[in-house]
Amino acid sequence: MAYIFLNAGVYVNGVNLSSYVSEVSVDMTLAAVEVTAMGAGGKQFIQGLEDSKIDLTFWNDFNVGTVNATLQAVRATGTLVPIKIYAGGSPASTVAPLYSGSAIMTDFPILVGKVGDALSSKATFQVSGTLTQAFTG
């Protein structure tokens, strides 16, 4: 069955920013560690450490308690913040999981656009440790 992505739930540092999000990318990358030994006919690998990141594209808003205020506060502290992405809004379900973890924000170009465009920003979060997938919550 195909899944139409209509209603992601996005929480950054406990703040619900879902109504401002236009695009979500959850990248659960695992390193490939080479373990090739002498005499092998080709390279051999084992799974290494997780190196996940989350990209969020927002329709920007400079009002108190919205996108800019929330993300500027995260940027200013430079510390880990909780992040939750619900694939189908909230709560999580067997067909729309929740991805959660702690992350630092590594990129936040605040002003991107040209005359006449809606103002958007893309924030990148580097996950510290692992990103958890859950079907309840």
Image (tube, grey):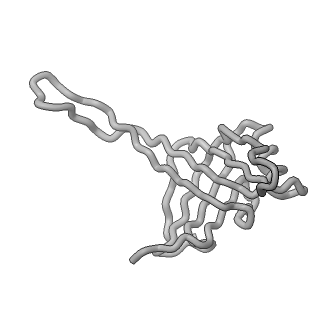
Q: Can residue 136 be seen in this view?
A: no
Seen from this angle, which residue lies furthest right? 64
Please give the name of the residue rendered at 51% of the width and 73% of the height, measured from the top-left corner.
4
Seen from this angle, which residue lies furthest top? 38
Establish if 40 lies above or below 114: above
Please give the name of the residue rendered at 49% of the width and 70% of the height, measured from the top-left corner.
135
Q: Can residue 84 be seen in this view?
A: yes
The C terminus: image quadrant: bottom right
Q: Return the x and y of residue 27 as percentages of the image width and height.
A: 49, 50
Establish if 97 lies above or below 42: below
- Camera-nearest residue between 69 and 115: 115
The N terminus: image quadrant: bottom left
Q: Return the x and y of residue 87 as percentages of the image width and height.
A: 55, 67
Establish if 2 lies above or below 48: below
Q: Return the x and y of residue 5 as percentages of the image width and height.
A: 55, 70
Q: Is residue 100 left or right of residue 79?
A: left
Q: Is residue 63 left or right of residue 105?
A: right
Q: Return the x and y of residue 3 as percentages of the image width and height.
A: 47, 73
Seen from this angle, which residue lies furthest front? 115
When asked about the image quadrant of residue 88, the answer is bottom right
- Camera-nearest residue between 39 and 14: 39
